[in-house]
Image (cartoon, helix red, strand yellow):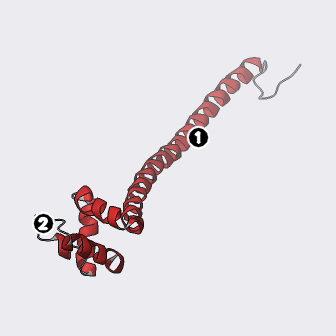
Amino acid sequence: AVELINPTVQQIADEGGWQDCERCRRSFASVWMADITIFQTVVANDNWGYMAIPVIEENPPTAIIFIGALMTLVFGVLNLIVAAIVDVFAENRHKDVFERASELQEDEKEQKTALSQIFKRIDADGGGTLSF
């Protein structure tokens, strides 16, 4: 960003741009200053129109850096949100599977009890076997 954007920033500053901004001329003078400016522009969205738009208008290929950083941030945050949602649904599904298994076991016990009662009623002599 420093090698591509700083010359454009210096050119805009030399032409009288950003006269009321003390920091603008040095905003891309070093890697550290470029990092701070990119953070301020993309993450904090503090000076997108003030810094990025004039630079992009003067040197359109610089849009790759600004828009690339913005898209990385947007998709990174979106990925985190989607991951959290998917995790919640996966956990709920896991709980639902165990609850359903427990319900099926209870149903099985009830059905076995009902069958046992039916068999006792049809066992005429009480010997534990059915006869015709």
Q: Give the quadrant of the C terminus.
A: top right
The image position of residue 33, as x and y in percent, is 22, 76
Amino acid type shown at disc 1: Ala
Q: Residue 101, which numbered label? A: 1
Any part of residue 42 in sight: no
Q: Check if mark 2's residue and mark 1's residue have beta carbons within 8 Å.
A: no
Depth check: give the residue in front, 13 or 50.
Answer: 13
Amino acid type shown at disc 2: Gln
Q: Nearer the viewer, mark 2 or mark 1?
A: 2
Q: Is residue 101 above or below residue 80?
A: above
Any part of residue 130 in sight: yes
Q: Residue 60, which numbered label? A: none
Depth check: give the residue in front, 78 or 130.
Answer: 78
Q: Give the quadrant of the N terminus.
A: bottom left
The image position of residue 60, as x and y in percent, is 39, 65
* Left or right placement of residue 19 versus residue 39 in this view: left
Q: Disc count in the image?
A: 2
* Secondary structure category for the residue under label 2: loop
* Left or right placement of residue 75 versus residue 119 in this view: left
* Secondary structure category for the residue under label 1: helix
Q: Residue furthest front?
A: 15
Q: Residue 19, which numbered label? A: 2
The image position of residue 39, as x and y in percent, is 27, 66
The image position of residue 40, as x and y in percent, is 23, 64
Residue at 41 percent of width and 64 percent of height? 68
> Residue 38's quadrant in the figure?
bottom left
How many other residues sit within 10 Å of disc 1, few (<14), some (14-19) or many (≥20)?
few
Q: Real-space Cα distance between discs 2 and 1?
A: 71 Å
* Left or right placement of residue 50 versus residue 95 in this view: left
Q: Residue furthest right?
A: 132
> Residue 49's quadrant in the figure?
bottom left
Residue at 34 percent of width and 81 percent of height? 3
